[in-house]
């Protein structure tokens, strides 16, 4: 059975891939949105943190025999610590200035990270095996679903929902949202805002690393994996608007699906379709689909 | 200042390798055009590589496939860059600050992928073997020295244009917009139009630089469109001095010179060094080379 000329298993296979990509877009744009919301800094190093997360998992496996499940916890922790260092030592000095300097700083850091890893590991990529519990797949009748892909979608979306819940429904989240709007008042109320900012940046970085570990068994772990992804995530963020957490998640997943559909029906446009959508959204709704004009 | 530049420019090729100088001049023009947007209008565009590359490809196409003379190719490339600048500008001006940067970045990626797919660009290989040609059908440009003077003339023309733009009422309004946009709006200036015009001028001159570069090196490749190139021009401007007239050129000279010096010594660590310079500049050296020198002169004059 075919839909518009594409057989059903192929279509659903691509859609699953789109869902997977979309979940990554969602997690990464969530991290960016959280960091931007409080610190007003676009974390260009997000892609690099994604890449470092994946590499820690790979190095952990090959050098220390650390298995996938441990990596899922260790990698975000390590990258989170790195994030703390970056924020305290460098980013903090730039808050008083034009926000573009934060972007430039993180850009420089991304270049450094990419360069260092590229020197040691080259660009060809290293392979990371799917953990045994998640190998193989399930035949659903209309398509064959690899278990690992399903796991990735579930894990990523769970993290997204958990983050959304933490921000919108808990007291810590309320503090965070308040600090985003009026930093001075919140600080006057006795909340340690600088520590909050450090932790926010670290959490964003950790989210990126988590996504990195998730992606390791699916793609070749290579130093450039972050930079390819980060630009698309930027476009996702522009389309979704940085106003709401839910917006980032929905936009991310939605765009992943759109990209997959484009790949099936008009392959050549698949790498540009997200940017085209961005151009259209900018014409029609400059604040983004879910954004609030600042 | 112009006289000094011309003198240095005329004498330089006899002291330093001309092709290196040509590369510096192309990037100096590119960085100066970028500085018009960032240093004077206060708009950080992360996608200027798109204009640089698109122009390079079109110029190469005109010269190689259509057999045009170099100046026609350069004009064609520059014209395309202007059109592209207008299109991108119209989309990007709608947001400001960080969003503007991200939009320009994403649009530049669009150009990158389009260039990857289009058949005439040669994809990953790039457009190679672009002929130096005969300028106006008369002057053979394959001689490096002749080509150098042609590039020097183009650079001086572009630089003069930027200089005139900066030191004009238009330039003053741009500075006003950079300093306090709401105030400029309340004073009655059509701020969006000014920004768009600045964007188009900046894009056009970047295109001029790109087209020239494609003839100098006889190559237009995907690296020209990659966002690393956009980042590099930001670095040149930042290092040289945002908002100064000579800063970007100084920055271009430094970066291209560094790349040249270190290429065989440290090889792949170049990216790391660039990133390191970026980080240091942003943290400690925001005024850039020319900026710091200017500040030094000022303190000395005041006697502080």
Image: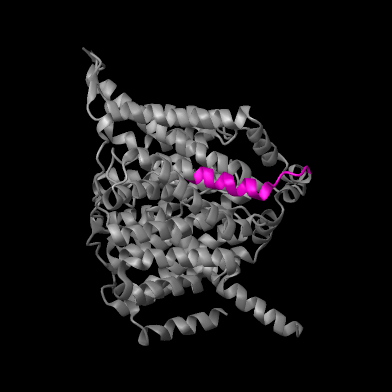
Which image quadrant is residue A231 in? top left
Number of marks drawn: 0
Visible residue check, residue B44: no
Q: Provide residue A254's location: percent of width, then percent of height.
A: 43, 27
- Given residues B240 and B93, the one toward you in this image is B240
Residue beneath the point at 36% across and 33% down: A21
Compared with residue B69, is residue A25 higher up or lower down, i.e. above or below?
above
Q: Provide residue B147's location: percent of width, then percent of height.
A: 33, 74
Q: Is residue B17 left or right of residue A45?
A: left
Q: Main secondary structure of the magenta part?
A: helix
Q: Provide residue B244's location: percent of width, then percent of height.
A: 60, 69
Compared with residue A238, is residue B49 higher up or lower down, i.e. above or below?
below
Residue beneath the point at 23% across and 59% down: B128
Per the rendered image, the range of residues in magenta is A189-205
- Given residues A61 and B125, the one toward you in this image is A61
Quarter of the picture holding the C terminus of chain A: top right
Residue beneath the point at 56% across and 40% down: A34
Q: Provide residue A200's location: percent of width, then percent of height.
A: 58, 44
Q: How is the image coloured?
A: one colour
Which image quadrant is residue A115 in? bottom left
Quarter of the picture holding the N terminus of chain A: top left
Task: Check if residue A160 falls in the magenta segment.
Answer: no
Task: Check if residue A194 falls in the magenta segment.
Answer: yes
- Given residues A205 and B302, the one toward you in this image is A205
Visible residue check, residue A56: yes
Residue beneath the point at 54% across and 28% down: A246
- Given residues B157 and B279, the one toward you in this image is B279
């Amino acid at each position: 059975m075919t839909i518009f000329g594409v057989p059903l298993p192929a279509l659903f296979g691509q859609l699953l891939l789109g869902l997977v990509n979309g979940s990554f877009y969602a997690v990464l744009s969530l991290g960016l949105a959280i960091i931007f919301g409080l610190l007003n800094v676009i974390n260009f190093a997000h892609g690099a943190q994604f890449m470092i997360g994946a590499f820690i998992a790979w190095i952990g496996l090959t050098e220390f025999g650390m298995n996938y499940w441990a990596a899922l916890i260790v990698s975000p922790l390590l990258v989170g610590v790195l994030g703390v260092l970056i924020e305290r030592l460098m980013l903090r000095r730039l808050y008083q200035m034009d926000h573009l300097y934060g972007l430039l700083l993180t850009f420089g850091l991304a270049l450094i990270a990419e360069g260092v890893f590229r020197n040691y590991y080259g660009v060809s990529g290293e392979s990371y095996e799917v953990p045994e519990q998640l190998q193989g797949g399930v035949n659903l009748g209309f398509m064959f679903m690899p278990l690992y892909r399903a796991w990735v979608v579930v894990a990523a979306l769970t993290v997204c929902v958990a983050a959304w819940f933490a921000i919108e429904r808990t007291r810590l989240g309320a503090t965070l949202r308040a600090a985003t709007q009026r930093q001075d008042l919140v600080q006057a109320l006795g909340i340690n805002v600088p520590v909050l900012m450090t932790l926010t940046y670290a959490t964003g970085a950790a989210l990126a690393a988590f996504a990195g570990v998730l992606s390791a068994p699916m793609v070749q772990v290579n130093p450039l994996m972050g930079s390819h992804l980060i630009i698309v995530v930027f476009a996702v963020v522009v389309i979704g608007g940085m106003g709401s957490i839910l917006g980032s998640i929905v936009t991310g997943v939605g765009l992943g699906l759109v990209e997959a559909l484009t790949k099936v029906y008009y392959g050549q446009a698949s790498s540009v379709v997200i940017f085209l959508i961005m151009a259209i959204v900018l014409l029609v709704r400059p604040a983004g689909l879910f954004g609030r004009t600042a | 200042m112009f006289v000094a530049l011309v003198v240095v420019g005329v004498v330089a090729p006899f002291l330093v390798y001309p092709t290196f100088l040509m590369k510096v001049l192309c990037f100096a023009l590119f960085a100066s055009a970028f500085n018009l947007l960032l240093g004077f209008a206060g708009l950080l565009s992360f996608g200027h590589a798109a204009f640089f590359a698109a122009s390079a490809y079109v110029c190469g196409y005109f010269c190689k496939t259509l057999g045009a003379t170099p100046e026609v190719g350069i004009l064609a490339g520059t014209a395309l860059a202007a059109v592209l600048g207008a299109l991108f500008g119209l989309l990007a001006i709608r947001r400001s600050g960080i969003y503007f940067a991200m939009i320009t970045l994403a649009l530049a990626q669009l150009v990158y992928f389009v260039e990857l797919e289009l058949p005439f660009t040669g994809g990953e290989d790039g457009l190679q073997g672009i002929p130096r040609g005969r300028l106006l059908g008369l002057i053979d440009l394959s001689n490096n020295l002749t080509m150098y003077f042609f590039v020097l003339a183009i650079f001086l023309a572009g630089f003069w244009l930027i200089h005139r733009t900066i030191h004009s009422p238009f330039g003053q309004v741009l500075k006003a917009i950079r300093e306090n946009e709401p105030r400029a709006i309340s004073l009655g200036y059509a701020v969006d139009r000014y920004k768009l015009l600045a964007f188009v001028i900046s894009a056009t001159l970047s295109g001029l630089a790109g087209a020239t570069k494609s003839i100098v090196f006889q190559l237009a490749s995907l690296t020209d469109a990659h966002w690393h190139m956009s980042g590099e021009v930001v670095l040149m401007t930042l290092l040289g001095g945002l908002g100064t007239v000579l800063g970007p050129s100084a920055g271009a000279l430094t970066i291209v010179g560094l790349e040249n010096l270190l290429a065989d010594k440290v090889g792949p660590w170049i990216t790391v060094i660039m990133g390191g310079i970026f980080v240091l500049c942003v943290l400690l050296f925001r005024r850039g080379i020319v900026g710091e020198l200017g500040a030094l002169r000022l303190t000395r004059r005041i006697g502080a």
